[in-house]
Image (tube, rainbow, N blue to C red):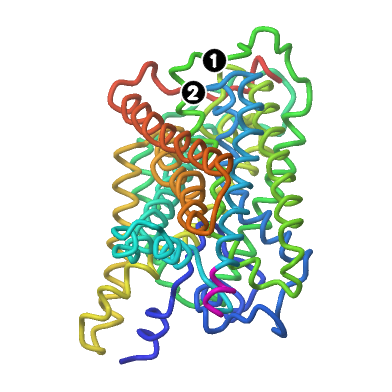
Amino acid sequence: MSTQRLRNEDYHDYSSTDVSPEESPSEGLNNFSSQGSYQRFGESNSTTWFQTLIHLLKGNIGTGLLGLPLAVKNAGILMGPLSLLVIGIVAVHCMSILVKCAHHFCRRLNKPFVDYGETVMYGLESSPSSWLRNHAHWGRHIVDFFLIVTQLGFCCVYFVFLADNFKQVIEAANGTTNNCHNNETVILTPTMDSRLYMLSFLPFLVLLVFVRNLRVLSIFSLLANITMLVSLVMLYQFIVQNIPDPSGLPLVAPWKTYPLFFGTAIFAFEGIGMVLPLENKMKDPQKFPLILYVGMAIVTALYISLGCLGYLQFGANIQGSITLNLPNCWLYQSVKLLYSIGIFFTYALQFYVPAEIIIPFFVSRVPEHWELVVDLFVRTVLVCLTCILAILIPRLDLVISLVGSVSSSALALIIPPLLEITTYYSEGMSPLTIAKDALISILGFVGFVVGTYEALYELIQPSSAPIFINSTSAFV
């Protein structure tokens, strides 16, 4: 058996967020996965509290952030930020539950580290139900399944995001000026359909995911984070200027659109897969709860501010990604291009997670000299699959809402409270704690069902055509 195969079979922890771009391979996703390489104490390359905070921030900030202004529109200018605050608090509480349960099993089993899937599996083994104990191994499979769906869903979102932004930049190229302040109407030059743009990106993304070396991927990740940070600074600089009168915006949107808000919001907050690797990698893991609360408070404030300011600035014309609403001048066209470049390189990092779950299953069943061929073939098929799904659902807002409702809600809201019940029920739990956990899981499940239904219904029978104009006029 080859070294590569052994490495893949040891891959157990899968973060549902970006990996650390500055880290070497021994510090990146591969190290997040191999429990044998983890030591809770005394590790020479452990991270400081500040490094952990930076990793936590960048792991929670991605494309979901840009969809939050439309999410606020789907909830209302009052209900939107309040709901984001509540979802943020609940999501952080679920993260802390996962860390607490993982610590419990580390102490009980004398293990240095357990990942999300293992924690759920051990939680089911601790259940008072004999049926759950006998089927505890399904806990890991369920977590892996939702991680695969989440990560490939992210990749689908990236295809749509790249197509929409590049299409708009190219169509407005003839009318793009250096003046970002005049109230000008730009006539877009029609080009090919956005689906053809997705197909245009397909071969380049296939070649990108052929890069399997984490050191090379870390370079791409660093470039992605720099371009996205610059883009966000320029984006905030625009949306805080000359905000229109918000009196015409509804405080509470129709309840029919609220499930779409839920899917987008939970998509943005779904960073639970990274908390255990980050906590275990710290020099002083006792400080992690404080870092978790501080980091997620910053993330929640960023989400609420961008969601509200973006909706206030563009109103009813807000699109699936706020970058699509930026003016057609070269300064803000560069914002779209910079963020798109960051998303392009981030694709390989998000793809790394499902690849390391799926590919070993096929590679382990072929002779060693066929391993590389099978590896590259499966990667190509998976990228093509994400492209096909993006082509079938070309609306960015619906892709984000659907992915958030289907998989992110399960990982972030449904599983952790149930895990706490199965872990501690036999040791004694207060009825209030049980009721709290049951309520969170029920709300997560309702959001899962209703959000998925509304996203699919809107896809099949859209209530209104999506807006594909550039709103640089009335709001500048």
Q: Quadrant of the N terminus?
A: bottom left
Q: Secondary structure at mark 1?
A: loop
Q: Which mark is residue 253?
A: 1
* Residue 241 included in the magenta stretch of the image: no
| Label 1 environment density (alpha carbons within 10 Å; few <14, some 14–19, many ≥20) | some
Residue drawn where x is 31% and y is 45% of the image: 389
Looking at the image, residue 211 sits to the left or right of residue 283; the answer is left
Q: Where is residue 129 drawn, in percent x and y?
A: 35, 56
Please, which residue is most extreme toward the left here?
Answer: 366
Please tell me whether residue 117 is drawn above or below residue 243 in the rendered image.
below
State the image coordinates of residue 369 (x, y, percent, origin top left): 25, 89
Lower position in the chain sequence, tag 2 or tag 1? 1
Question: Relative to residue 45, is residue 383 drawn left or right?
Answer: left
Magenta extent: 105-110
Residue 258, numbered circle: 2
Q: Which residue is pictured at 56% across the width and 16% down the height?
A: 316
